[in-house]
Image: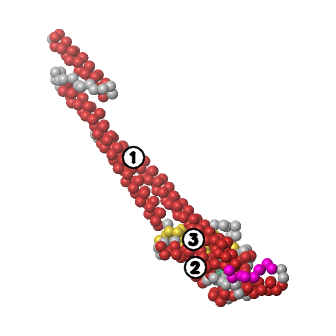
Amino acid sequence: MRLLAKFSLIFAVVFGLGLAAAAFLFHDSLQRSAREQVLHEAQIMMETALAMRNYTTEQIRPVMNEISQPYDAKAVDPISRICAREAAARRVFRPQTVPAFAATEIFNYLRKKYPDYFYKEASLNPTNPRNRVVDWEEDILNVFRNRPDLALLDGERMTPLGKSLFLARPMRAAKSCLECHATPGEAPQDMVKLYGPANGFGWRENEIIAAQIVSVPVTLPVQMANRSFRRLLVSLVAVGFVTLVVLDVLLYFTVVRPVSHFARRADEISKGQMEVPELPVKGRDEVSILAASFNRMHRSLAAAMKMLEQQK
Ligand code: HEC
């Protein structure tokens, strides 16, 4: 095999092996970072949902109460207290002031633009039927009920719009929740009128009553990771190819061509043509040293031959 072919083959094999190892590592790490990105997105969505819930509880509800409760609920005299209680029972109720409603509705607006994003407070016994668990959500809720220490759960699943990653948190009923979720009698009358007395009641304090679930699409970040991977691979192959061509050209001009020249000259001298010109010596590299040595040998040989002829 020619020197150039041998060199090119070895380069291609070594580069190919290196490329395969790099591709494996890059693919793995790109996929991992795509998943981390999706998870991060889901975490932000979850925090946004919590923020919306907090806003409703901390800011909207007090304002509503102020508007609809003209009597002092903490009043000490009995008459004021009765008035206050009656006022509380007649209290204007609007679902818009309910944290669960606010968070779900806000995400419904978001889904108009991004239909593959999804938020739900999935419950086995929901006030609003749209919040009832479906099969996979029930599995999540059961995991939380069986493992009360679990604070967060994530996983992947297929949806009609592609692969999605979900993040779920258990929701517990606090004491303050029971004013609406214990019995229809205790709940605001307007609420019972609106939602009926059948569902969303009978919750007990500290019971896990729902799972807060966000679901974000995985397809786009994975596609982006795959695209970056392909681009990286193509550029590495191009770099390898250009490097090989440059090295081959260099090898041809610095080694292959001079060595072939030496070989031809050695051939001519061995056939007795002593009058051929000397090899050019350029620079101080190994090939030049070889050329200089060759020229010295040529000269010595010519002198020896001349002496031999004179002796004859
Ligand atoms: C003022 C009454 C009220 C209070 C207080 C209240 N909720 Fe609700 N809750 C509702 C109503 C009404 C709905 C139905 C909202 C809808 O239409 O989506 C609801 C819905 C929910 C849902 C969605 C599942 C379902 O039942 O439809 C969860 C989960 C929930 N509430 C949890 C809580 C928790 C936890 C608390 C206490 C921190 C709480 N709620 C306090 C009235 C209330």
Residue located at (64% from left, 78% from top): 97
Nearer the camera: disc 2 or disc 1: 2
| Amino acid tagged 1 | Phe
Query: What separation in Å lies between label 2 and label 1 (alpha carbons)?
Result: 52 Å
| Amino acid tagged 3 | Val
The image quadrant in which ligand 1 is located:
bottom right
Q: Quadrant of the N terminus?
A: top left
Quadrant in which residue 199 is drawn: bottom right
In the rendered structure, does residue 72 fall within the stretch colored magenta? yes
Q: Which residue is mark 3?
A: 214
Quadrant in which residue 165 is drawn: bottom right
Q: Which residue is mark 1?
A: 15
| Amino acid tagged 2 | Val
Q: Which residue is mark 2?
A: 134
The x, y position of residue 26, in whole percent, is 47, 54
Residue located at (57% from left, 68% from top): 45
- Say whether marks 1 and 3 touch (CB < 8 Å): no
Residue located at (20% from left, 17% from top): 302
Magenta span: 67-75
| Mark 3, secondary structure of its residue | strand
In the rendered structure, does residue 135 fall within the stretch colored magenta? no
Q: Quadrant of the C terminus?
A: top left
Pointer 2 local density, CA inside 10 Å: few below 14, some 14–19, many at least 20 = few
The x, y position of residue 34, in whole percent, is 50, 60
